[in-house]
Image (cartoon, helix red, strand yellow):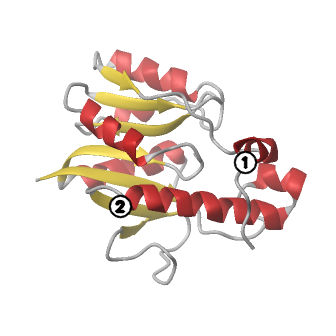
Amino acid sequence: MNNRALLIFIKNPERGKVKTRIAKTAGDEKAYQVYLELSKHTRKIAEQFEANRLLFYSQFINQKDDWSAEDFQKNLQAAGDLGIRMVAAFQKAFEQNEKVVIIGSDCASLTSNIVEEAFAALDAHDFVVGPAKDGGYYLLGMRAFQPSVFDQIEWSTEQVFRNTIRNIKKLEASYALMPVLSDIDYWEDWLEYGWELTD
């Protein structure tokens, strides 16, 4: 068994289909560029420490993008809602790993140190969760496959984090919390963070 796996969910980048809430304010092109910048940031974080890195695409596996097949095991997300897709990804990862953490690609303030601390937290806790300011989470990890943590959650709402903790408590499991961070969901979020878009 390997010690740990990092799961990353990304969307296949298409103008008009990524960061749609940003697009409503700033247009499709800027929304597309924001998504590419966040994806690059996430990729750099993942490359900075040792783990089995499993990348899950939303629509098709792209063998020719900037995610190196040498550094990332490329997979396709399962069909269904976000919970179903995460259950399938965790189940696959636990076939060969003992600790598994998933991150998205929307958090500009995520660092490799936070991910490292999340894996370390699983030495003493059953779960680790990184709460997002919008009521969701940017990171979730576990040290045994527990699919019921995703049960009865209405995704993309302010209740995701709260209901996830509810499910953990139902399991009578222990959990650690990472710092609260912000996802980049709106143009105002991007402007507040202060990154420049590169042409």
Q: Quadrant of residue 144?
A: top left
In this picture, is 140 found above or below 72?
Answer: above
Q: Quadrant of residue 116?
A: top left
Q: Are marks 1 and 2 in contact (CB under 8 Å)?
A: no
Residue under the image location 36 percent in, 77 percent down: 69
107 horizontally vs 6: left or right: right
Residue 126 horizontal/vertical position (percent) = 26, 27
Residue 161 horizontal/vertical position (percent) = 53, 26
Q: Amino acid at mark 1?
A: Gly
Q: What residue is disc 2 on?
A: 54
Residue 44's tag is none
Closer mark to the observer between disc 1 and disc 2: 1
Local secondary structure at mark 2: strand
23 horizontally vs 128: left or right: right
1 or 2: tag closer to the N-terminus? 2
Q: Amino acid at mark 2?
A: Leu
Q: For label 2, count other residues whose C-alpha is less than 10 Å away and answer few (under 14), some (14-19) or many (20+).
A: many
Residue at mark 1 to residue at mark 2: CA–CA distance: 30 Å
Residue under the image location 83 percent in, 56 percent down: 23
Viewer-nearest residue: 59 or 141: 141
Q: For label 1, count other residues whose C-alpha is less than 10 Å away and answer few (under 14), some (14-19) or many (20+).
A: few
Q: Quadrant of residue 28?
A: bottom right
Viewer-nearest residue: 192 or 89: 192
99 horizontally vs 86: left or right: left
In this picture, is 198 found above or below 2?
Answer: below
Residue 77 horizontal/vertical position (percent) = 46, 60
Does residue 17 appear in this view?
Answer: no
Number of callouts: 2
The quadrant of the picture occupied by the C terminus is bottom right
Q: What residue is disc 1 on?
A: 194
Local secondary structure at mark 1: loop
